[in-house]
Image: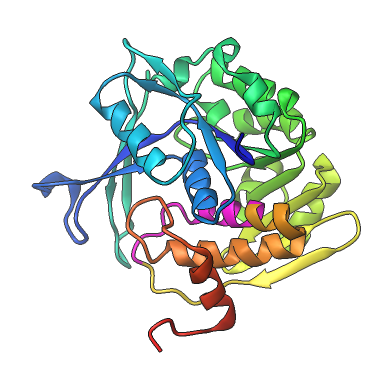
Amino acid sequence: MPDVVAIGETMLRLSAPAGVPLESATHLAVHVAGAESNVAVALSRLKTSAGWISRLTDNPLGWRIQADLRAQGVDVSRVLWARGDRVGTYFVEMGRTPRPGRVLYDRVGSAMAAINADEVDWAYVREAKAVHLSGITPGLSPSCRELVARAIHEAKAVVSFDVNYRARLWSPAEAAAALAPLLSHVTILISTAADARQLFGIDGPARLGAQALRDRFHPDVAVVTDGVHFAAATSQRTFERDGYQVESIDRIGAGDAFAAGFLHGYLAAGVERGLEYGVVLAALKHTYLGDMVWVSEEDVQNVLSGQDAWR
C-alpha cells in the first residue's frame, strides 16, 4: 500500500510555444496535468510511495494519463474507467511581462465529474498514512463534493487539503460554503494568501494568515503561501520561511509542488521539515515545463546546501 493516496481529476494540458499565441499556434505540447496527481508524482520521485484515484475515459487520452503517472512510480491500480465520458483538457498560452498568460479550460462533462463515491476502493484509502485532496475536486460536480467528504471520513491518518480555489468552477461564496465544513476535519490545511482572503476574509501576511486559518478551522497545521513568503502555524508555534530567487520557465504547478514537498517533509520529520521541503520544491517547479516537478532528493539537498551540481 502507498504511503499517500491522492484523489482528484487529471487533464491533458496543451501548451503553445513560448511567445506564440494560441490563435496562431501550429503545434501544441502535451503534458499530463492535475493538482493531486502532480503531488503524487513529486512524492513518488522523493521516494514517498504514492497512489492516485480518479476516473478516466477508456481511450488513448485516458491511457496517456495513466501511463505517464505509472512511469513516475505512482500506483494507478485504483483508477476507475468510463467509456461514455471524456478526458478534460486545458490550453495554455505562456505570457511574458507585461502580457499575462492565458488558460482556457475544456473540462465540462469529464469522466471525473461523474465519479460515484461508492465505486472507490475505500479500504485502499484507509491503509494510507495520508490522503491528499484539493478544493478543485468539490467544485467539479455534486458527486465530486460527495467524494471528497467521503474521503475525509474514510481516511484513518493524515488528511492534507489544499484550498486551490478556481474561479472558473465556482464563486468565492459557493466555494467557501462548500469547503468550510470539510476544512474542520483535515490535518494539514494549505492555502495561498489570496485564497484565504477571497474565500474566508482572512487578510495579512503569511504568518497571520496561517494563524487565523488554524484558529478558524482547527487543523493540526495551517500553511499559507504568499509569493516568496511561507508560514505554517500549529497550536505551539508558527514557522516561517522565505523562498528562493528563481528564473521561471513555467510557474504552473508550483503550488502543487509546494504541497508535495510539505507533505513529504511533514511525514518524515514534522512541520519545520515540511516547510523546508515545500519551499524548495516550489522553487524547483519553476524550472520545468509542464505541471510536474521532476525533482529528486539530490536536487533538494543541492538547493538547501547552495551547492552547484556542476562543480
Q: Is residue 155 left or right of residue 279?
A: right
* Residue 234: image location, x then y, percent: 84, 55
In the image, residue 257 lies in the stretch drawn in magenta: yes
Q: Nearer the viewer, residue 294 or 160?
A: 294
Q: Is residue 280 left or right of residue 25?
A: right
Q: Which residues are magenta?
A: 249-263
Q: Residue at x 75, y 55 (%)?
A: 210
Q: Residue at x 52, y 62 (%)?
A: 282
Q: Is residue 301 left or right of residue 288?
A: right
Q: Residue at x 69, y 30 (%)?
A: 127
The answer to whether residue 205 of the structure is visible from this angle is no
* Magenta span dominant secondary structure: helix
* Residue 15: image location, x then y, percent: 25, 48
In the image, residue 287 lies in the stretch drawn in magenta: no
Q: Residue at x 77, y 48 (%)?
A: 213
* Residue 263: image location, x then y, percent: 65, 51
In the displayed orientation, state which residue is furthest to the bottom: 311
Q: Is residue 118 left or right of residue 307?
A: right
Figure quadrant of residue 207: bottom right
In the displayed orientation, state which residue is furthest to the right: 236
* Residue 56: image location, x then y, percent: 38, 23
Quarter containing the N terminus: top right
- Give the colouring mode of the picture: rainbow
In the rendered image, the vertical position of residue 179 relative to residue 268, given as above or below: above
Quarter containing the C terminus: bottom left
In the rendered image, the vertical position of residue 297 relative to residue 23, given as above or below: below
Q: Nearer the viewer, residue 308 or 95?
A: 308
Total marks drawn?
A: 0
